[in-house]
Image (cartoon, rainbow, N blue to C red):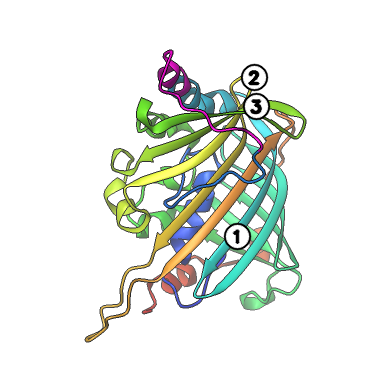
Amino acid sequence: MHMRVKGTKTGAIVVSAIMGSVVLSGCGGGGESEAKGSNASPSTSGSDGAPEQSTTEVRAAYDKTAEAESARMTIQMKLSAAGKTITSDGKGVIDLAEGDSVMTLTVQDKSIEQRVVDQVLYQKSPDQKAPGGKPWIKIDLKKVAAQQGMSNQQIGDPAQTAAYAKAITDKDVKKVGTEKIDEVNTTHYKVSVDVSELPGGDQMSKQLGPTLPMQVWLDDEGRLRQQQIDMTVKAPASAKPGNSAPPKQLKMSTVMQFSDFGTEVDAEAPPAGQVADMTDKALQNSQQPS
């Protein structure tokens, strides 16, 4: 899901942040987080050993979800920057072991076909004009992550989710209550991840802040049924002489739901002759002056 917001330098990191969350990296976002549609009453986890138990359950959730191998996924996202907001909704299937996915997105009332295969993002839109008249564009997410000083884990490496689990401690997890998500009983937790404990944490801290708050809803088998991330990404300040403008910010709210575990996923790259490689352009866009 590649959405570039003009006037910011955050286009590339948005891609990596979104893909990280989509492939169950366990990575959240900076900023205050409020549950959407929550009807649970908050509860503290400071007694009866609850903090340790909650932490264990949340830390194990990503591995348990990945063990399902695949799932149907829906995602709702809102990006806000410079007084403008972009909304998108998506639905499709995801391979939880490899990170590949096939989705249909609706962005600002426009339909986009999207595939992720081997950490390469492919998109096709009816009104898209790719170089050479080709219907598909592609962006190599590994290169995008590398420019941002991140490891592949930030764009979705399910085999490395333990790195995120280790960054969650007892004091970072609070059990909120129980709720139904799509008619499934779940337990709702608020989680805070220490960015400095993550691979590439030093670079991430500069743009995301010291902690990554997120919310997760786990089913009775300990699998992730819903995840909410409210992220604030800070764009680097311009180096122009005399520039006193504050760093620009992009706010991103993402809610994902998972269901139908074990469903079939058939993610194949489009024929090479139908694809225009936009990776370099995406990298250039992320380096343009504010």
Q: In this view, does 39 lie to the left or right of 281?
A: right
Task: Please tell me which of labels 3 and 1 falls first in the chain.
Answer: 1
Q: Position of residue 53 (x, y in %)?
A: 46, 17
Q: Where is residue 24 in the image (x, y as percent from the top left)?
A: 53, 38
Does residue 56 lie above or below 155 as drawn? above
Task: Please tell me which of labels 2 and 3 falls first in the chain.
Answer: 3
Find residue 149 and report its image quarter.
bottom left
Which residue is farthest top? Answer: 48
Cα distance in 3D space between marks 1 and 2: 29 Å
Find residue 128 and report its image quarter.
bottom right
Inspect the magenta stretch and tell me whether residue 47 lies in it: yes
Does residue 194 lie above or below 124 as drawn? above
Q: Which callout, 3 or 1, points to the residue nearer the camera?
A: 3
Q: Residues within 10 Å of mark 3 (few under 14, many from 20)?
A: many
Which residue is farthest bottom? Answer: 242
Does residue 144 lie above or below 215 as drawn? below
Q: Is residue 239 left or right of residue 192?
A: left
The residue that label 3 is drawn on is 186
Q: In this view, does 245 lie to the left or right of 250?
A: left
Residue drawn 44% across and 33% down? 161
Amino acid on which disc 2 is placed = Asp
Decide if residue 269 is in sight here.
Answer: no
The residue that label 2 is drawn on is 220
The residue that label 1 is drawn on is 78
Amino acid on which disc 1 is placed = Lys
